[in-house]
Amino acid sequence: MKRITLAALIFAALPVMAQVAVKDPWVRATVPAMKATGAFMQITSAQDARLVEVKSPVAGIIEIHEMAMEKNVMKMRALPDGLELPAGKAVELKSGGYHVMLMDLKQQMKEGDTVPLTLVVEGKDKKRSTIEVKAPVKPLAAPGQTEAGHKHSH
């Protein structure tokens, strides 16, 4: 009986899941004592939706963040209401912009590892669906990035 129920739940979620595409997910590597890092990707939703939560067994706290310049000061803040995913438009989660903060890390993020992420997306109808993502861990200084994760500008 449980098998049929689980299969029904999976098939019920498929139409929504197929409408949200995740491209090039990755997590920045850490040094041994670091307790936080970022996760980055490109998300495209076929319909207006919102990324409302991200879960992963590697972190105790996970928040969706925005980094923006305010009066020449780089400020980072959590987006408690989530991140808008306008229909048909790719939303880039990248260093220096929107990103996912993985905090209270349970282990070091080492290059070559894979981090499981569960994205929770809410449609306009308030129905939620989850998308399982396997994000590879990339070096601290990913291309175009400094050690602190900010893009070089010359």
Image (cartoon, rainbow, N blue to C red):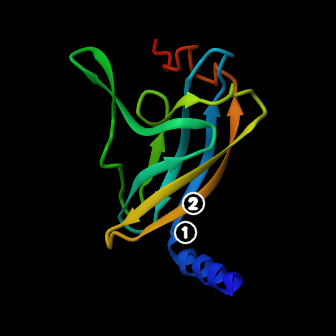
Residue occupying the point 62% across, 43% down? 57
Q: Amino acid at mark 1?
A: Met
Label 2 secondary element = strand
Give the number of marks. Answer: 2
Label 1 secondary element = helix
Question: Badge 2 is on which residue?
Answer: 131
Look at the picture and state if 64 lies above or below 87.
above
Q: Are marks 1 and 2 in contact (CB under 8 Å)?
A: yes
Of all residues, the one furthest to the left in this rendering is 71
Mark 2 is surrounded, within 10 Å at the Cα level, by few (under 14), some (14 to 19) or many (20 or more) other residues, namely some
Q: Amino acid at mark 2?
A: Ile
Residue 74 percent coordinates (x, y): 33, 19
Mark 1 is surrounded, within 10 Å at the Cα level, by few (under 14), some (14 to 19) or many (20 or more) other residues, namely some
Question: Badge 1 is on which residue?
Answer: 17
Residue occupying the point 57% across, 54% down? 22
Residue 144 percent coordinates (x, y): 58, 22
Residue 47 percent coordinates (x, y): 40, 68
